[in-house]
Image: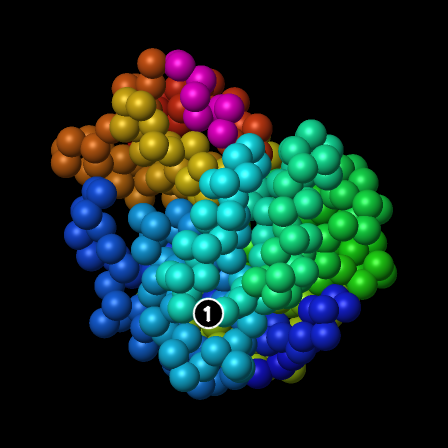
Amino acid sequence: MIYRDLGKTGHRVSQLGFGAMRLPMVGTGEDARVDREKAIPMIHRAFECGLNYIDTAVGYCNRDSQRVVGEALKGWRDKIVVSTKNPEYDSEEKWWQNLEDSLERLQVDYIDIYNHHGINWQRYTERVEPMVSKWMRRALDQGLIKHICSSFHDSNENLIKYINTGYPEVITLQYNMLDRRLEEGIALAHERGIGIVVMGPVAGGRLGVSTPVLEELIPGVKRVPELALRFVLSNPHVSVALSGMSTMQHVEENLATASDEVSLTAEDRARIDEQLARLKGLADLYCTGCGYCVPCPEGVIIPEIFQKYNEARVYGLWEMSIRTYAGWAARGRTLADACIECGECEDKCPQHIPIREQLKEAHKALTRTPS
């Protein structure tokens, strides 16, 4: 495993981090829970191979992720940097309850990397700076957390303003081959000694597919997910690339990539730039699959619809995407035409996607006859 400095925190962390957002599940609906017989061996395999950074959150995996991470940490706590998040910005009582719950679920005395969950500049200026930051600093003084951090969803301009406050020690943000908008801010963060943790290196699963468009792009790199991970790790300003691994195969493949000294050259990255310019259609609809838009009041499976729509538009996989969409309809899943345009999803979308309009377009495209 290859290690990097996590900003000025003093931690040397594996350049691959375990994102505990997409652990294998059993059950359905509100009864769904993490499949411990699969998930814990996956996490332990990663630890055994040198991975020492794991990230979870209150709501991940139907609110079960933190408990599973806590179970997996037994016997490993002193070797692992643990990151989790607090989504509360209004109630001090609820904020402290979230922290206490996380300590209990993770079965730890302190949390290494404690994040404001889903920050943006407005949220920082209106809630964090005048109020929530005081709770965070008190938790730091009490030794319940070790570093003040945040996950971030906003523009590059606002990322730079946030960095310039000097408040966060580590920022977790989105960055991948298809979304490079924050590169300038990432470089500034590195210059200021702020650790950068990348979420979504495979673009919410869109770069997890097999496609000739990218498979022959770089000699020696035949798998698109490997190319995507190598792209993120080739940026020297990145400390950790989080991967949301849901199978042991994902774990083994990512460990192999992150343990290989070979990274992408400047020529490789230029070739990627040229290819991505040809995929400009993606800019019309960018969805990371983060899931903040759901649950939809009508049950529309928004992230899954957008994923299939993007795979078709960007990679030309229309036949597969249309077949999948028809299969969802046959199984009674709630598709885009059930949208009543209430707008609740758009209020929650960190990417500010015009979801209602894009659902109409996706449904029309995915119900046509393949050419």
Tell me if 228 is positioned left or right of 299 in this view: right
Image: magenta residue range: 341-348
* Residue ID for mark 1: 108
Q: Position of residue 280 (x, y in %)?
A: 61, 37
Q: Residue at x 62, y 81 (%)?
A: 2
Q: Say what amino acid the circle numbered 1 marks.
A: Val
- The quadrant of the picture occupied by the N terminus is bottom right
* Residue at point 55%, 45% (across, down): 117
Please say whether residue 202 is visible from this viewpoint: no
Q: Quadrant of the C terminus?
A: top left
Residue 178 location, x and y as percent?
60, 47
The quadrant in which residue 324 appears is top left
| Depth order, front residue of 247/34 | 34
- Snapshot colouring: rainbow
Q: Residue 216 sits in which quadrant?
A: bottom right
Q: Is residue 24 above or below residue 294?
A: below
* 42 inside magenta stretch: no
Q: Is residue 342 magenta?
A: yes
Let me know if residue 100 appears in the view.
Answer: yes
